[in-house]
Amino acid sequence: MKTISKKIVLVLGANSDVAKECMKQYLSKGFHVIAASRNTEELKNFVTQNQEFSTQIEVVYFDAADFDSHQKFYDELSEKPHIVLYAAGFLVDNQEALKNFEGTFQMMKANYIGAVSILNSIATDKTNKNLERIIGLSSLSGVRGRKSNFIYGSTKAAFTQYLAGLRQELAERKIIVNVLVIGYINTKINEGLELNQSLIMEPDYVAKFVVNAGNSFTIVPNWKWKIIYFILKILPESLVAKLP
Ligand SMILES: NC(=O)c1ccc[n+]([C@@H]2O[C@H](COP(=O)([O-])OP(=O)(O)OC[C@H]3O[C@@H](n4cnc5c(N)ncnc54)[C@H](OP(=O)(O)O)[C@@H]3O)[C@@H](O)[C@H]2O)c1
């Protein structure tokens, strides 16, 4: 018989394909999951599809872009989390985002501003003695500015840096902060994009790195992406400028 853990995972942007795989893995480990998304109908379908875990999962409404609602959202949580996963993300084609600020702004809101807004509330609540870990899903696009995706990339770079500082801020309280620096995943955010098939990861594969996150700040799933990550980090700007 499975032991039900009393630990609570709050998943922000829970309708993400990666987040759903993370939730399945947390649920099967016995965690209680608070699944937060702007599409609660879709999350209810997720609960129906995972009926065996229905008593361990709670669905709540959360819009990363509605900053004014965040404090109330956090205050009203049925229980305060042990683990927080920020999975919301938005992607608009770079050329489109360059011409249309609305697309740029939406990426800023979902990928960065919304994350900072809600995570600030969570991180500064010293009354929550449960909190032990905050995990953010960031991207290799945020490692270097490249002409094909620097607007999305800049929101992810900002998110990564925020998490790095947050980790330092929370270290005294023994709260761990991890950033997943992720390459291509087979999820709906990439629909319609032509990506190098040999580099695409499945959401359940990436989810394993989230659910089993240890003490390291940066986690780069997959050895091929690890190599790309380290090359990108050290590549001179003149060579980065030659990349797509
Ligand atoms: N797929 C990749 O190749 C890749 C690579 C690196 C990093 N990432 C990051 O990984 C995370 C998960 O993405 P994914 O690959 O699982 O794609 P996904 O299935 O498209 O998930 C992204 C989720 O973000 C949610 N979202 C967007 N704006 C939101 C808002 N204002 N409030 C609440 N939720 C919002 C979307 O919700 P709705 O369903 O309601 O639209 C969607 O479910 C994202 O942060 C993404 O940037 C993905």
Image (cartoon, rainbow, N blue to C red):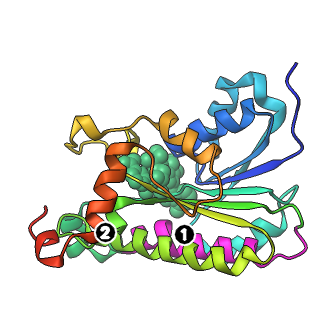
- Within 10 Å of the Cα at label 2, are there few (<14), some (14-19), or many (20+) other Cα atoms? few
Q: Is mark 1 within 8 Å of ligand 1?
A: yes
- In the picture, residue 170 is in which quadrant? bottom right
Q: Which residues fall within the magenta stretch?
A: 105-128
Residue 172 locus on image (x, y percent): 78, 78
- In the picture, residue 19 is in which quadrant? top right
Q: Is residue 212 left or right of residue 147?
A: right
Q: CA distance from mark 1 to mark 2?
A: 31 Å
Q: Is residue 132 above or below residue 17?
A: below
- Within 10 Å of the Cα at label 1, are there few (<14), some (14-19), or many (20+) other Cα atoms? many
Q: Is residue 93 visible?
A: yes
Residue ID at (64%, 44%): 211
Q: Is residue 119 magenta?
A: yes
Secondary structure at numbered mark 1: loop
Residue ID at (31%, 52%): 227
Q: Which marked residue is nearer to the observer: mark 1 or mark 2? A: 2
For the residue marked with disc 1, what is the amino acid? Answer: Ala
For the residue marked with disc 2, what is the amino acid? Answer: Lys
Is 236 or 124 nearer to us in this picture? Answer: 236
Q: Quadrant of the N terminus?
A: top right
Q: Which mark is residue 233?
A: 2
Residue labelled with disc 1: 65
Residue 158 locus on image (x, y percent): 45, 76
Residue ID at (18%, 75%): 236
